[in-house]
Image: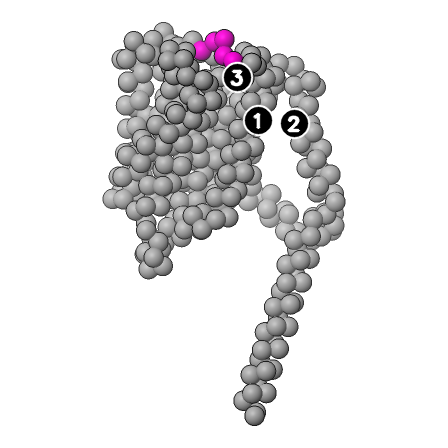
Amino acid sequence: MEELKRGRCDLMGKISNESTIEGIVRVKSSKSPIKFIVYFIIGLIILMLPFIYGSYITYIVSLVGVYYIVSLGLNILTGVAGQLSLGHSGFFAIGAYGTAILTMKAGVPLLFSILISGVVSLLVGAIVGIPSLRVKGLYLAIVTLGLGVIVQKVLLEFTALTEGAAGLLFENIHFFGFNLSNETTVFYFILAFCAVFTYLTYSLLNSHTGRALLTVRDNEIVASSLGISVKYYKILAFCISGFYTAIAGGLYAVLVHHLSPEMFSINMSITFLAMIIVGGLGSIGGSLIGTAFYVLLPEMLRNFKGLEEMIFGFFLLITILFFPKGVWGIVQSIKRTKLFEKLSGN
């Protein structure tokens, strides 16, 4: 009888604790109207951007959108799965040239050209991911570096398709009757892809796959003991990242209208990696902040030639030394302060 009472008390204690936890979760998860208003205003400004500013600002923001998708893909590989890559210029080039060649020379509709290029890059990512099963860190970065070099060499040599060093023109593009030579139309086209890939990334990070990738990053032995296939998830991370980057490459071709092999050098791969380090590894917000910082900084300092590279390098050094979670980590720290909670109504 006493054991029954003791068990009942324990059970009531657990229920009480669970209800308390649920209450805390409900309080924490309650959204302030201020946040919705802020998000609504930001979204409205983005949608109205082409009508508020000129075509040049619209082009710059579109470029941020293209690189943002690259950052999302690279963050899944490096920030979430913990695999270092310096070969993403190769994936980017596959997407850009693949889209242009399929659309202009094979007559494939634009959307299908972008998706086919993404699938090809996904398969290349599976091949590139195989070395990740044996090497890590800097050694893996050197191996992936070979992808960018090989792709750039192919673009230079296969002149029948790529036009070689002269470059490939990608003009008079239409999508369901819309002329994508117009900056405003291209802006909304890229914005739609950004919205889709943001949702896909958010869903991935909060899924079983995302948690498995994080476990592989943190400790491969623990991941294996939990029944997680380390080999499968490493290669999967390369596939997803390659697909994202190639899709962004296709959008880049639509945006710039002219492609040349010199665009896709090792400097591009280093830039991609620097963007997610400065913005914040493993986060969607960090991908956006790092991309915006890299694209907008040269525009703000274009009257001071060479200074933007120095400042970006300085921020990269400071981030690595003092803010390993990037700018997004600083933002999250501010959001956890009591003053911010009072201002946001939480």
User: Which amino acid is tagged 2?
Assistant: Ile
Give the foreground label among 2 and 1: 1
Q: Residue 315, can we see it?
A: no
Residue at (34%, 27%) from the top-left corner? Answer: 120
Q: Alpha-carbon distance for marks 2 and 3?
A: 22 Å
> Which sits earlier in the primary sequence, circle 2 or circle 1?
2
Residue with the mark numbered 2: 46
Whether the residues at callouts 1 and 3 have beta carbons within 8 Å, the answer is no
User: What is the x, y in percent for residue 165?
Assistant: 34, 9
Marks 1 and 3, the one that precedes in the sequence? 3
Q: Of callouts 2 and 3, which one flags the residue occurring earlier in the amino acid sequence?
A: 2
Q: Nearer the viewer, residue 90 or 102?
A: 102
Question: Where is residue 288 shown, x and y percent of the image?
Answer: 55, 34
Q: How many angstroms separate mark 2 from mark 1 (CA)?
A: 9 Å
Q: Residue at x 47, y 9 (%)?
A: 171
Q: Nearer the viewer, residue 327 or 249?
A: 249
Please state the horizontal and vertical placement of residue 81, each as a whole percent of the image: 40, 44
Q: Element under label 3?
A: strand
* Relative to 7, residue 337 above or below: above
Residue 11, by quadrant, is bottom right
- Kindly report the secondary structure that dominates the magenta region of the rendered protein: loop
The mark found on residue 191 in the picture is: 1
Residue at the image position 58 percent from the left and 44 percent from the top: 330
Mark 1–mark 3 distance (CA, rounded to whole Å): 15 Å
Could you classify mark 2 by the number of other residues whose Cα lies within 10 Å: few (under 14), some (14-19), or many (20 or more)? some
User: Is residue 207 in view?
Assistant: yes
- Kindly identify the amino acid type of the residue bearing the numbered disc 1: Leu
**Local SS, label 2:** helix
Crowding near pointer 1: few (<14 within 10 Å), some, many (20+)?
Answer: some
